Image (cartoon, rainbow, N blue to C red):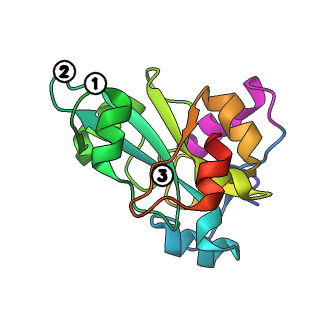
Amino acid sequence: MSERLAQSAGKVQRVLEALGLLARVIELPSTTRTAREAAVAIGCHVEQIAKSLVFRTVADGRPVLVIASGRNRVDEDRLAVLVGEPVEKADAAYVRRHTGYAIGGVPPVGHLEPHQTLVDVDLSVLEEIWAAAGTPHAVFCLTPAELLRITGGMAVRLREGPSSTTSQRALD
């Protein structure tokens, strides 16, 4: 762990503390820009990576934060139904403008403005998960329950593909 965190990582650490989370932001020598890179750098399974993805609603341009398991691809049609209108993946400038962070380092909290937040229910079956902490080298560990608490997010099935028993049980 770095003695002194990069500015964005330090901001995330302060937000976590203000939210009452005991998690510590750590900076890694390797990049954590993608879920696979993060899993390798941390030494965990790719499904334990809680990737923060920003989508933009097509009609009114509203940001939607999706926190998905690193193994899963988000079903944009399902996401559109959940938010009530079509969505598209946000570009880098939009992400920075609405969150204050660059793609690859977007944390689940500490954004410039509040967003509707949807959390992949597949994360709920894991004991611990890892999320970005403001830079492509910074991460922190937390539980799925803590993630839902600090984001105010709603756990929903977001991944592409047929429904699984695990996901269906978590929604019931």
The residue tagged 1 is: 62
Residue at x 62% of width, y 41% of height? 171
The magenta region covers 7-21
The N terminus is located in which quarter? bottom right
Q: Cβ–Cβ below 8 Å for labels 2 and 1?
A: yes
127 lies left or right of 71: right
Residue 105, numbered label:
3
Q: Is residue 31 visible?
A: no
Q: Which is nearer the N-term, disc 3 or disc 1?
A: 1
Would you call the spot at circle 2 few (<14 residues within 10 Å), some (14-19), or many (20 or more)?
A: few
The C terminus is located in which quarter? top right
**Given this view, does label 3 or label 1 mark the residue nearer the observer?**
1
Q: CA distance from mark 3 to mark 1?
A: 20 Å
Report helix, strand or loop for mark 1: loop
Residue at x 30% of width, y 31% of height? 97
Q: Nearer the viewer, residue 160 or 50?
A: 160
**How far from the left and from the top, in percent, is residue 150?**
68, 30
Q: Amino acid at mark 3?
A: Gly
Q: Any magenta on residue 10?
A: yes
The residue tagged 2 is: 60
Q: Which is nearer the N-term, disc 3 or disc 2?
A: 2
**How far from the left and from the top, in percent, is residue 140?**
70, 52
Q: CA distance from mark 3 to mark 2?
A: 25 Å
Q: Nearer the viewer, residue 62 or 3?
A: 62
